[in-house]
Amino acid sequence: MSSSEERYLNHPTFGMLYLVTHAGEGRDVYATLYAQKMFFLVVLEPRGAQFEVIPYLDARYHAERNLARCRRSGSTELAKWQALFNQTFI
């Protein structure tokens, strides 16, 4: 994903979700765009997506791990992920 790209999904009940962080193993954490602070672990599949509601602290844990991975690898996307972390969790 390029640093200027934002990803959104439409949840059938909760509406628009935005990408918060990668969670590894083909999973991503998304949050509700309008009704703040609901988090979902999402697996995209060829015929749709699987949504699992996760607690705030689990979502934050995944985001912190993603930031640590970016720091270790020297990723050029660190600033983007840090800004999303700050926007979502601080």
Image (cartoon, rainbow, N blue to C red):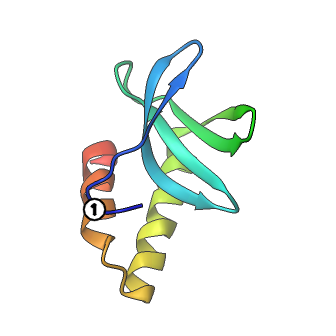
The residue nearer to you, when weighing 4 against 12, is 4
* Left or right, 21 with reference to 45: left
Q: How many marks?
A: 1
At a point 67% along the width and 43% down the height, the residue shown is: 44
Q: Quadrant of the N terminus?
A: bottom left
How many C-alpha atoms fall within 10 Å of the one at disc 1: few (<14), some, or many (≥20)? some
At a point 33% along the width and 61% down the height, the residue shown is: 81
What residue did someone put label 1 on? 80
At a point 51% along the width and 24% down the height, the residue shown is: 10
Measured from the top left, where is residue 60 in percent x and y? Answer: 47, 52
> Which residue ends up furthest to the top in the rendered image?
13
Measured from the top left, where is residue 39 in percent x and y? Answer: 52, 35
Measured from the top left, where is residue 36 in percent x and y? Answer: 37, 25
* Left or right, 55 with reference to 17: right
Q: Secondary structure at mark 1?
A: helix
The image quadrant of residue 23 is bottom right
At a point 34% along the width and 20% down the height, the residue shown is: 34
The residue nearer to you, when weighing 2 against 18, is 2
Residue 20 vertical position relative to residue 69 in the rendered view, above or below: above
* Left or right, 48 with reference to 74: right
Residue kind at label 1, given as amino acid type: Lys
The residue nearer to you, when weighing 30 against 47, is 47
